[in-house]
Amino acid sequence: MAVRSWIDAIVECLSQARARLPADQHPRDLAQFVLTVMEGGVMQARTFRDIDYFDAAVRQLRQYFKCLEPPGRLAPRRRETRSQIKKTREKHHA
């Protein structure tokens, strides 16, 4: 089933980041949560025909992961969302 392979891929990513996550986090449960958030964002973006809904879901997911990191850890460099990239392109091509 495709969903299982997605969850397995997310578990692998989480395993690579294990040192940054609390020890009591269950990787498979967390992977299912990640997939649920992203699929929910996709569903809303399709329903409203607006990618900002997906971007908002991913933003909140990133915020959640920041909350899981131990205090004092340097935050990774922030990446632009698709809507931010789109707005920048529109601004420069206008």
Image: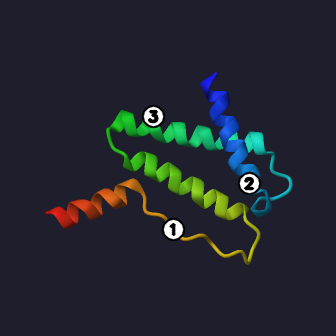
Q: Are marks 3 and 2 in contact (CB under 8 Å)?
A: no
- Side of 40 relative to 12 (left or right): left
Q: Secondary structure at mark 3?
A: helix
Query: Which numbered circle lies on residue 48?
Result: none
Question: Furthest-left residue in view?
Answer: 94
Q: Three-letter amino acid code at disc 3? A: Met
**Residue at which label 2 appears:** 16
- Front-most of 4 and 22? 4
Count neighbours of disc 2 (C-alpha within 10 A) and say few if under 14, some if 14 to 19, many if 20 or more. Answer: few
Q: Three-letter amino acid code at disc 2? A: Gln
Residue 10 higher or lower than 65, as above or below:
above
Q: Secondary structure at mark 2?
A: helix
Return the x and y of residue 20 as percentages of the image width and height. Answer: 75, 63
Dot in front, 2 or 1: 2
Q: Three-letter amino acid code at disc 1? A: Arg
Dot in front, 1 or 3: 1
The residue at 38%/54% (across/down) is 82
Return the x and y of residue 5 as percentages of the image width and height. Answer: 65, 31
Q: Image quarter for residue 94?
A: bottom left
Query: Which numbered circle lies on residue 78?
Result: 1
Return the x and y of residue 56 as percentages of the image width and height. Answer: 46, 52
Q: Are marks 2 and 1 in contact (CB under 8 Å)?
A: no
Nearer the N terminus, badge 2 or badge 1?
2
Residue 1 higher or lower than 10, as above or below:
above
- Side of 51 relative to 43 (left or right): left
The residue at 36%/61% (across/down) is 84
Q: Image quarter for residue 12?
A: top right
Query: Which numbered circle lies on residue 43?
Result: 3
Estimate the spatial distance between the alpha carbons at disc 2 and disc 1, rounded to whole Å: 19 Å
Estimate the spatial distance between the alpha carbons at disc 3 and disc 2, rounded to whole Å: 28 Å
